[in-house]
Image (cartoon, rainbow, N blue to C red):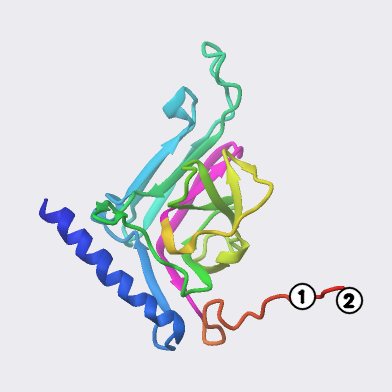
Amino acid sequence: MFGFLRRSLDVVKEGGTKILKANPAPWNNEQLLLRLNSVKDLENWAVGCDKDVGGFSDSKLEITEEGCGKFHGNISLDVPKDNPRITRSGYAGIRSKVHGSSLFGIRCWDTSLYRYLSIRARGDNKKYFVNIQTDGPIITDLFQHRLFLRSPGEWETVLIPFRDFILTNHGIVQDPQMEMYREKVKTIGFSILSQPGPFRLDIDCIKAINTDSTDGDWNIQPPMQFHEKS
């Protein structure tokens, strides 16, 4: 009960920050969302793969000796012969757990003051996706973007504009698209699909940030509107 009330008070305090939208402050250029630097940090994450439903892939999330999260395992495209319901395989993923509920509903991150999702990661030669779930009406909706890592084996900081995420549902791009509900980001995750063999993605931290030359989306001019003369 105490934890529930404390989270409710936290929501009230978080709501007070929304007055910054009228005049975003330059000193408020980043918000730490998640760290993966300790065993305790990993308690905030869920791990899954197709093995959970009868496939043969496996995945783990562990802490390395240098103190970062290691998402690793092996992807198998084999389909179990004794389960005709499974026709595709080759998936593994991790996602942050939901923060918890309060008097005001599920606790979420408000990322609307920031332009980029910043990820400090070290990958291999495999392709990974970043997944964002918002507190929207369809719980299977995910906003996805490729995690473009240019130097395998080296630490990189990747900035992804929130505006560039694509709405998907069960891996299928949705039409029409809709804007991400950035005031209600519920979970953040990573996934790998259909790439057989071992994989490893190290993750240090995830932030919502602006840069020295940006101020959230506030300095992006809307597209010019043209109207036909009557």
Q: Which residue shows up at 39% across the image and 41% down it?
A: 47
Q: Amino acid at mark 2?
A: Lys
State the residue in front, 46 or 4.
4
Q: Which residue shows up at 60% across the image and 46% down it?
A: 168
State the residue in front, 86 or 63.
86
Q: 171 left or right of 6?
A: right
The residue mark sitting in front, 2 or 1, is 2
Q: Which residues are magenta?
A: 186-210
Q: Label 2's element?
A: loop
List the residue tagged with mark 1.
225
Q: Quadrant of residue 64?
A: bottom left
Point out the image quarter for the C terminus.
bottom right
227 to 181, vertically: above or below: below
State the residue in front, 10 or 67.
10
Give the overall secondary structure of the magenta segment: strand
Q: Which residue shows up at 39% across the image and 63% down it?
A: 204
- The alpha-carbon separation of the residues under discs 2 and 1 comes to 13 Å
List the residue tagged with mark 2.
229
The crowding category of the residue bearing disc 2, from other C-alpha atoms within 10 Å (few below 14, some 14 to 19, many at least 20), is few
Query: Mark 2 near mark 1, Cβ–Cβ under 8 Å?
Result: no
33 to 102, vertically: above or below: below
Pinpoint residue 53: horizontal percent, then vertical percent: 45, 25
Query: Residue placed farthest to the top in the image?
Result: 82
The crowding category of the residue bearing disc 1, from other C-alpha atoms within 10 Å (few below 14, some 14 to 19, many at least 20), is few
Pinpoint residue 44: horizontal percent, then vertical percent: 30, 51
Q: Quadrant of residue 11?
A: bottom left
Pinpoint residue 108: horizontal percent, then vertical percent: 36, 58
Q: Which residue shows up at 45% across the image and 70% down it?
A: 208
Q: Amino acid at mark 1?
A: Gln
Q: Label 1's element?
A: loop
Q: Is residue 196 magenta?
A: yes
Q: Is residue 35 magenta?
A: no
